[in-house]
Image (tube, coloured by chain):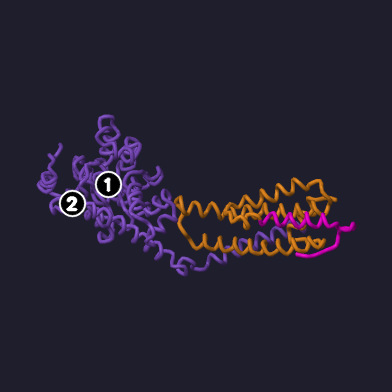
Chain colours: A orange, B purple
Amino acid sequence: MKSQTIFLNKITEEEAEKASNSYLMSLIAVIAGLPLPIINLIATLIFYMGNRKGSYFVRWHCTQALVSQASFLVVNSYGFWWTVSLILGDSEMTNSYIAYMITAVLFNMVEFIATIYTAIETRKGRHVEWWFYGTLTNQLCKS
Amino acid sequence: MKKLIFQGLISLVLFFACWYLLSQVQWLKIFKVERLANKTEEKVGDMIWSAIKASDQVVYDKVVTGCVDSIFAHICQANNIDVDDIHIHVMMDEEVNAFALPDGHLIVNTGLIKASKDEAALAGVMAHELAHIQKGHVMKKLIKEMGLSTVLTMTSGGAGSEVLKEMLSHISSSAYDRTLEKEADIQACDYLIKAQVDPNAFADFLYNLGSEDAAAAYLNWISTHPDSRERGEYILEYSKGKFKDSKKIVSKSAWENMFHNLGHEVTD
């Protein structure tokens, strides 16, 4: 993760707030205490749709929040359905399952901390690019 | 673009490497998963069995239980299953039914014994329920139908008699899903073949239950075990050519005495 100043125009208070909110949206499921991994993505997607015509700074951060949520959806959904099949289906509890859940929790925690950090930084008008997601966002989001 | 692919690959490798390395740890032993699961099953099984025992429907007649025990022990011994792990009970109930409870309790209704034409048919149904126990289907079904939280609440003493009744009703009067039923049927076939008991008798029993004439008489068994005819057919198909010699388990007189004590005539 790295902080940069690539935006030539001064970031307004409103832009900083919107960019910061795009990250807070991805935490909505944690706040609501819902186990369904899709909720995060839906919340971020709705926020992205609402701001896709916003300034480059806002769009960029909405996109970074969205792409990171999309990949975490895959990780979390796999864990979610594995758990469901364990309770309702024929799957057995294995070391591999526990290892997967620990890995998923570890990666989610890293993402959670990064999300809070980025929400704080963007609120101050500072640009934060994540490893991989930042590069991907640069490809997707053109000024 | 190269940077993106490189970073994406590194992230993927990191994730899978983390998963792989953590998989090498014996988490099941660390968390004592098996012991915990066994303890829960033991508690649930004991609670349900205590409720059944209190209903005064248990048959203690040595002639009846002796005959059922002999047939069951024969199947277990032939398949290297420890008989002490399974607790078989006969219940005075006219419903044609047998069902497995958690922690290896197997209930056989007198209605089922009376409906069995011979020892092989009764052995077939018992082998089917034994397969459910051995394959761990019982707890899975309970958790699926009642929810994990209810089952866990019950073991911590937080459930009342109503929950116990509901649990018993789920276990005794509703089917396992199709896949589990088929799995238990096929396993039962293997048990019977090893025990030199004709699986065709079990297939016939199921097939006859599927007939319209039997529908009214054996309503309970049919509702809990659907598609009896189809099951009879695939058991016949599976056991074709595998079964050679049959072995008599209980003597004719023991079989007749059991029917006599149940107040029923042996059907030919």
Between A64 and B196, the one nearer to me in the picture: A64
Q: Secondary structure at mark 1?
A: strand
Q: Quadrant of the N terminus of chain B?
A: bottom right
User: What is the chain identity of the residue bearing mark 1?
Assistant: B
Chain identifier of the residue bearing label 2 in the image: B
Inspect this view and state whether residue A71 appears.
yes
Q: How far apart, in angstroms, are the residues tagged by discs 2 and 1? A: 14 Å
Magenta span has A73?
no
User: Relative to the observer, which residue lies in front, B252 or A14?
Assistant: A14
Point out the stretch of residues depicted in magenta. A1-27
* Front position in the image: B144 or B133: B144
Is residue A17 part of the magenta span, yes or no?
yes
- Which mark identifies residue B59? 2
Relative vertical location of residue B219 with respect to residue B142 in this rendering, above or below: above
The image quarter in which residue A128 lies: bottom right
Amino acid beneath label 2: Val
For the residues bearing labels 2 and 1, Cβ distance under 8 angstroms:
no
Q: Are marks 2 and 1 on the same chain?
A: yes
Q: Is residue B261 left or right of residue A80?
A: left
Disc 2 crowd rating (10 Å Cα; few below 14, some 14-19, many 20+) is some
Identify the residue under disc 1: B98
